[in-house]
Image (cartoon, rainbow, N blue to C red):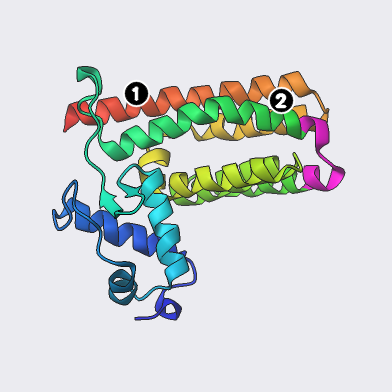
Amino acid sequence: MTENHISRGTRIYEKVVEKLKESIALGELLPGDPLPSERQLMKEFGVSRSSLREGFRVMELLGLIESIPGKGRFVRLPRAGSDAEGDIQLEDSAVLELMEARRVLDPAIAAESAMKATPSDLTRMLRVITDTERKLDSPALRAQVDFDFHLVLAEATHNFVFVNITRMNFDLILATHDKIYNLLDDKDAFLQEHKAMYEAILDHNVELARDMAAKHIDRIYRTLHRGIAARGDSQ
């Protein structure tokens, strides 16, 4: 199989992530095991080296593999944690750590966007919000428009570091959208909070944009934390 045989709607690296996660789940790759060579995985998955490495990057963000300089890539060993966190899976832990980082980053991006957004940036934000209104009922589509909105927000800072950080963060979010967006069933709050951030940026109100972004990501973090804990209790 070559990359051309994979459907256009699926990004190639997602196939790499799915196959590696499946191998770990089935016990074909155990914690501490080295990953097969890049050449072997490229042949097995039918992907290019760049797509394979993008998949590796997402797996590292998920906390499922780690790269050890001079030795290679390995399935990550479970991290020691408190008893209260003992039932949270490694991937869930990575999602929560990402959200903790976003509690710092997102307000800063929104504030910078409020200072620097151009009329073109604002038009693109509004288009994404309009698109969001049509796609709220599907978790997968909601994940995509969430990425679209936050990417436009980052691009409105006109700072490539913020743009790259947002892209990296959403690699993880989109790879685990089934975990995240099925827990985030508060669709109306999701849309209204994006609108509130847009309105603050439209007015170039830096502090209000920062505050709206902080409240938005704080609510998401708390909702996910409760949902993941409840799911662990039911297993």
Q: Circle 1 sits in a helix, a strand or a loop, which is it?
A: helix
Q: Residue at x 42, y 61 (%)?
A: 53
The residue drawn where x is 39% and y is 29% is 224
Left-right relation of 172 to 19:
right
Residue 99 placement (x, y as % from top left): 47, 31
**Residue toward you, 183 or 138:** 183
Mark 2 surroundings: few (<14), some (14-19) or many (≥20) residues within 10 A: many
Q: Residues within 10 Å of mark 1 (few under 14, many from 20)?
A: few
Mark earlier in primary sequence (1, 2): 2
Q: Where does the image place residue 153, in percent across and percent down from the top left?
A: 69, 40
Residue type pointed to by label 1: Arg
Quarter in which the N terminus is drawn: bottom left
Q: Which mark is residue 78?
A: none
Three-letter code for the amino acid on which mark 2 is drawn: Ala
Where residue 104 sits in the image (x, y, percent)?
57, 25
Q: Tell me, yes or no, whether the highlighted magenta stretch contains residue 134.
A: no
Q: Which mark, residue 226?
A: 1
Q: Main secondary structure of the magenta part?
A: helix
**Taking 3 as reference, is 102 left or right?**
right
Residues rendered magenta in the picture: 114-123
Q: Residue furthest right?
A: 119
Q: Is residue 78 left or right of residue 52?
A: left
Q: Measuring 73% from the left and 42% from the top, which residue is drawn there?
A: 159
Say above or below: 37 vs 66: below
Question: Does any portion of residue 58 appear in the rendered image?
Answer: yes
- Quadrant for residue 85, please give it: top left
**Residue of label 2:** 209
Q: Quadrant of the C terminus?
A: top left
Q: CA distance from mark 1 to mark 2?
A: 26 Å
